[in-house]
Structures are given as C-alpha cells and as structure tokens.
Image (tube, rainbow, N blue to C red):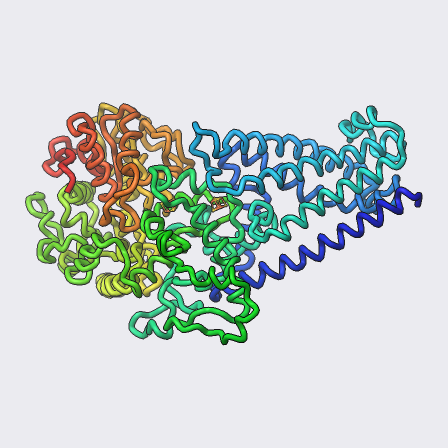
Amino acid sequence: MGSVQIVTTILAAAITAVAVWLAVRAVMKMTAVIRLGQPAPERFGDKSARTSKMLVETLGHTRMLKWSVVGAAHWFVMVGFIVLSLLVLEAYFEVVSSGGGLPIIGHWTIFGLVTEWIGILGLVGIGVLMVIRLRNRPNRPENRSRFTGSTMWQGYFVEWIVLLVLIFGFIIRGFKVATDHFEYPLWATPLSHAVGAVLPDWSAGVSIAALIKIAISMTWLIVISLNVTMGVAWHRFLAFPNIFFKRDPEKPAGSGLGPLRPMTSEGKPLDFEEADPEKDQFGVAQVEQFSWKGLLDFSTCTECGRCQSQCPAWNTGKPLSPKLLVLSLRDHAYAKAPYLLAGGGKDLTGEEKATQEQLAGVDVLAMAEADRPLIGTAEEGGVIDPDVLWSCTTCGACVEQCPVDIEHVDHIVDMRRYQVLIESSFPSEAGVMLRNLENKGNPWGAPQNTREDWTKGLGFEVPRVGEIDDFEYLFWVGCAGAFEDRAKKTTRAVATLLNEAGVKFAILGEGETCSGDPARRIGNEFVFQMLAQQNVETLNEAFDGREKSKRKIVATCPHCFNTLGNEYGQLGGEFEVVHHTQLLAHLVSAGKLTPVQPVDGGVTYHDPCYLGRHNRIFAAPREVLGSAIGDGRGGAASDSGAGRDSGLIEMPRNSERSFCCGAGGARMWMEEKIGKRINVDRVEEAMATGAKTIAVGCPFCSTMLSDGVNGKGAGEQVEVVDVASVLLRSVKPAAPAGEPETAPAAG
Ligand code: SF4
Ligand code: SF4
C-alpha cells in the first residue's frame, strides 16, 4: 500500500464511520417516531401477497410506469441505485489498492457488463429526471407545477449526488483502464474504455477517484441522516415497507380506494353501542393518534406531487393539496416527537399524561409544536386548516397516483371523524343533511312514504321484496334515485330496461334508507353505523336463506354501490353488488336488450369517482354507450383506460385519471366558496369535446354537471344524461321513461 492509499484509506474509513453512526441514529429516530402511532394489526395478514405486491410494485414500477418517460427514467435510477451500491462497496477495495475490486464477482465479465450498462442507463435516467424537475420548477410563472410546495433543494441535491456517483464510477474504471488494472473487455465496457483513453496513466488516480466517490456517497448519507424528513431520499428505503403494509395487497392499484377503514381505537374497530369517548379514540385529534402505518405514510412521501397534480381541489384553487397535507402532518409529527418520546401527550379527556420532570428536558420548539391544534386556522397555529380538511371530495385521485401507496383519504376522514363526532365542527350547511339522515333516513328530508313515487305510471308493476320470492336482483334505488327528479328518470329507465329484458327484480320500497355514504365521508361514523346496521338487517332478511352468490343487488348510485358492496361486510352484510351499467352491459351482450336507434350528436362519458377510480369499473358504461351510439363499435371496451374503441369522444382526463364532479365526500351538501367550481371545470372539459351528450353513471355527477352546463347557459345545446337513459332511448325510442333529462336549474 503506497502513501496515497494510506491517506485515502484513512479518510474513507473516517467519513464512513461518521456517516454510518449518523445513519443508525436517524433510523432509530424514525423507528421511534413511527412506533408512536396506534396499533394496526390488520396490516400483518397475508404476508405472501404483501411480499409479491411489494416486489411487483417496486421492481416493476407498476405505479410509476403510468407516467411513462418519468417512470422509465426513475426505474433505471432505482435499479442503478441498488446495483451500483455494489460499486460503492467496491470503491473501498479501490482506496486500498489501485488494482482492487470486489472479491469473486468483481472478476466476472458479466458483472462488468451489467454494471457498465446500468451505469450508462442510470446516467440517461438521472439526466431525464433532472430536466423534468427543472422544466416543472414551481418558480416558472407559466407552470402550475406538481412540485409547488416541495423542498426543491433536496430534490436537486439527491439528483446531483446520483449523477456524481455515476460519473465517478466511470472515472475510477477509466483510471483502471489507463493504468492497465482493468480486466473487462472493450465489448462489455465501452464507456469505461472510452474514458480510460483520455485519462493519464496515473496509478494514484484510482484510489483518489474512489475516495471522492465514497465521500460523495457518505455526504449523501450524512445529509439525509441529519434530515429525517427528507422523503425524496428516504423513500428509497421506506417505500418497501410502506407498500408491504398497504391496506389491501390484493388490489391492483390504490389500496386506499373503495371502502373506508372502520373507525378504530387501539387498533380495534369501534362499536358505537359500547364506545365511550372518554375511553375510546374517536377519529384523530393528535398526530400520534394516526396508526403507525399513517406515520410511515407521512415519512415515505417523496414530495413528487403526482397527487397534487390530479387533485380537483388543488386544480380549482382550493387550499387543499394532498401532498402539502401529508408534508404538514409529517413535519408536525417529527417536530412534536421529542415531547411525545419523553412521555408527553394528552389523554382522551385532554389531560397531560407526562409529569413536569419528564418534560423538563424537552426543547421549547417541541413543546410549542405540541401545543398546536391538529385542525385549526393559521391564527390558531393549526397544522391543517379547516378549509383544507373540508375541501376534499374523497375522489381518490391522490391515492390512485401515489407511487408509494400513501392512503390520503383514510387520513383525511380520520381527522374529519374527530371534528364531527367530538368537536361538532364542520361546515354548518352540512348539518341539515346530517339531521335529515338521522330523522328521515335520507339527506333531502323527504317523507319516507314517497320513496316509491317513481314507480307511478311506468306501465308495469314494480314488485316489492316480500311480494315475490324468486327475484334475481334486488334493485337498490337509493335516496337520489327515489327523491331527486333527475335521478328518478334514471331509476325509471333502469326499471324499464330490466323489465324489457325479462330480469326478475324487486325493490325494498319504504324499507330502504340512505346507505350512509355521505355520513361516513363527512366523518359521522355514528350515523353511518346506525343507517348501515338498519339496512344490513333489512337486506339480510330480504335474502334470508340465500348463499352470497345469490344475494344480488343492482344499484344506480356508485356511492350506494361502493358502500353496500365494500363496506357493509364490516357490519355483517355480504352481498353481490353490481352497478346498473354492469348489468345493462351484460344484458346487451347477451342479446336481451337490443339498441335500434343510434344516438347522434356525439357522446362523451364522465367516469364517476366511486364507480371508476374507487371500484375500477371503466369498461361497462362504455360498452353500453358504444352499443347505443350504434356505429358497430360497441362492446369493444376494455379496462385499460383511454382510447377504448366504443365510439365515444373521450375527455383528456378519463378513466383512472378522470376529474371529479365535486360532489363526493359529502361535498354535495357543502357550499363551494373558494376558487373555481369543480363542476364548471369538468363541464368545460366535457363541452370542449364537442359532444352534445355528456353521459354519466351517478346521480350526483348528473346534478353537478347539469348545474355546470346550465351555469354556462348551454342547457339547450348540451344534455347531461345517465347511461341507462341513453340506452333506453336507443332500445325503446318512444318509451315514456326515456324523456330527455334536460338540465333543470340548480336546486
Ligand atoms: S381525495 Fe381527491 S379531493 Fe381529496 S385530496 Fe385526494 S385528490 Fe384531492
Ligand atoms: S403522490 Fe405520494 S409520494 Fe408523491 S407527493 Fe403525493 S403523497 Fe407524496
């Protein structure tokens, strides 16, 4: 070992020792913070499904590749990071000796070949990511950047480190070529040989370049260890457990979509018949009341902003950005952690748990952070502003897009639950809806004995459960479908089509009450459970003696469809629920309904969030519309998203990336006072297609888009209509139930 190698070895060892010590300290700190969260025992089941999903999503980049160029570039950088870590290890042999290398595999040509090409593709990948970040930087006035609010220096820092580590990898190899210490052939390592051709024959060069590479890598480790909230770096490690512990490993995408999690205390679902707010946790009032998985979610956020770029609230000028919400919770959790780790915290009656001695050593900043309300205005020092919390439509676009499977909607609803159940603090206008649900069983407060009024004048009998036993489908009408004029037309159209196709169905009539979706999404779990339990009882009675596959329900409202099919199981109600568009698509393809009159003027389709993104039903409504459009292309739809060959004119934001109408998350019953109206934004997009018909599959979308069309003064030119009504007009052009759903003035 020469004198240069002695110096490089000592320096490499010293900086590595410091970096490793800091990294161990940082990992212990992060682990301690995440462990502050509440138990989540359900996250440990089905380990083989979890492992395979984690490997598919990380190694396959299945979420990221939806953003093709970025996804591909990021894949090469990720693989480069994993594989080239071996080359950082090799650098420790190179600081000791210019001819040093990894034992055994370091002599294999295949190792030289693979690392060479991963290095080259990694260079291209990081170059692409750097250009994308620069082109999207938030300070460019023409951009509404997904990076707005991200900590930009951290992104630049990580990218430059990756670039420099890759460059120094080739410089080390170049010096080895120049000093004749390189054992790989030219055909396997062309770039290393090209670099070697321009470098001098300097034997110390290998060890010095290796030292620089180690110093760069360890600088990265030191910086991220001193910044435990630096998600852009830490996600390289945290993404693996975060995806492993996702809510539902069986789901193809967006594990936090579909059903909401039940309300839990100490990790156990709460039963409101026994729950006590002084002993049980009702929602989330303090950051440590999220589960440990919630705190892991916050720690894993990469600040990529994909959620923000798709969020309807953010895109229409509301203060909510799912990314900024997650970052606020993360920063608050880590700033408050010293107080919590010292034993601090409030019990469920609001009393401090720690003694003065325990808190004596906690720094003032952590104590000040602990005093901040989780939900509060800027003047109150709140972590999350109420306008942020109540702007969410629970559309799920954030969950769908997040590459590391963060479950934003669950966290938002958990915070709403505390605000509603304990603080009674929510937009006042929604109070009427909640009172109507409690007193009348529907959000409009309509008399229960008018639930069957929609059946009048249909020209055939609609049987109630109990009047016939051999019904195949129970038609769940829903409150909108029973009481709201526009939705009633859809209900009548569906009933007419089912009757036409010879489907045996029955309704609950006055036995039906609200599914509870708006109560649950606003955070009133108490009212949800009350309504849901009542419905589960009624439905179990209606299906008494039938196995699950014969407990079939068809629903026209995607919110009811989601709640009955995905959430009633939490309360002992197991049913086979289909959306009416699925059943109609089946009846058309089975030849039981035959469209005869083509729909003209162009049709575009708006995917309802709770049908599409939350339940991944994209094809069925397009198949029905394709058959009614009548150009022979119907029925060719697939679940792959845009561009289905159904004769529809697709909006730019469709299928998985569809844009919300603004009504979900109980926003239907709240005023939209900030920014542009979401329904207007969506209607502008729909009208820009030139289609004369905007087809929908949800009564709330129908109301919101109709209001938007009317607001634009385009009610005469553009019609908002349910898929079922489009089909009915094509199947029975003269049917009375198929009268056009012209958009009446907003109610
Ligand atoms: S659910 Fe929709 S509205 Fe709510 S934060 Fe996510 S993207 Fe925004
Ligand atoms: S998409 Fe996920 S990782 Fe990216 S900023 Fe949003 S929450 Fe963070």
Left or right: residue 61 versus residue 692 is right
Give the residue displayed 52% in from the left and 62% down from the top: 364
Give the residue displayed 37% in from the left and 73% down from the top: 349
Residue 699 picture location, percent across and down = 22, 44
- Give residue 638's quadrant in the image: top left
Residue 729 picture location, percent across and down = 17, 32
Residue 79 picture location, percent across and down = 65, 41
Give the quadrant of the N terminus: top right
Compared with 710, 543 (above or below) is below
Q: Residue furthest left?
A: 457
Residue 389 visible from this viewpoint: yes
Compared with 620, 428 (above or below) is below
Residue 574 picture location, percent across and down = 33, 60
For the residue pair 473 and 390, the one nearer the viewer reads as: 390
Left or right: residue 238 versus residue 584 is right
Left or right: residue 171 versus residue 462 is right
For the residue pair 652 and 153, the one nearer the viewer reads as: 153
Give the quadrant of the C terminus: top left
For the residue pair 22 and 448, the one nearer the viewer reads as: 22
Question: How many marks do you count on the picture?
Answer: 0
Give the residue displayed 39% in from the left and 62% down from the top: 284
Residue 472 visible from this viewpoint: no
